[in-house]
Image (cartoon, helix red, strand yellow):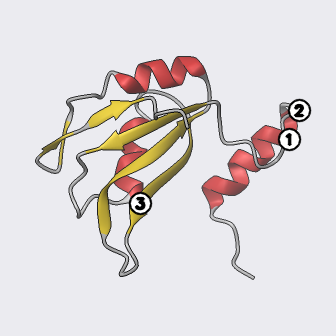
Amino acid sequence: MVPFEEKDVARINENISNGRPADFCGVAKLYVGNLSFTTSEDELENLFSEKGTVGSTTIVRDETGRSKGFGFITMLTEEDGAAAITLDGYDLDGRNLMVKKPREN
């Protein structure tokens, strides 16, 4: 069994104390494109946490583990999501981020 990271334990405890399901990550899912292949989930989370509470961070990777240059951030509230969208065009690792709401299926 893999232990939870400290930040995940804190999120779970906060969710439970606020009457939300333990696995709740947020309501504002955002697409983040034009990522450098060297950008990590931690770097992305640190940047977006300046705009609000980050519930989850995922960089999409190929079968070798290499970044495909895009990912998804889930922000806790719609307000946090709106603030995070202002990072559209932000220079991270020499690339201008593309931040927007993901397409609906």
User: Disc 2, disc 1: CB below 8 Å?
Assistant: yes
Give neighbour class at mark 2: few <14, some 14-19, many 20+ (Cα, 10 Å).
few
How far across and down, in percent of the image, does residue 63 sit? Answer: 40, 78
Q: Position of residue 26 (x, y in %)?
A: 65, 35
Quadrant location of the C terminus?
Answer: top right
Marks 3 and 1, the one that precedes in the sequence: 1
**Front residue of 8 and 79:** 79
Q: Mark 2 points at which residue?
A: 19
Relative vertical location of residue 70 with respect to residue 80 in this rendering, above or below: below
Task: Give the residue at mark 1.
Answer: 16
Label 1 CA crowd tier, 10 Å (few <14, some 14–19, many 20+): some
| Cα distance between the residues tagged 2 and 1 | 5 Å
Amino acid beneath label 3? Val
Picture residue at 46% right of the left edge, 33% below the top: 103
- Looking at the image, the residue that sits furthest to the front is 105
Q: Which is nearer the eye, 104 or 81?
A: 104
| Circle 2 SS class | loop
Determine which of the numbered discs, if any, sits on residue 60 in the image.
3
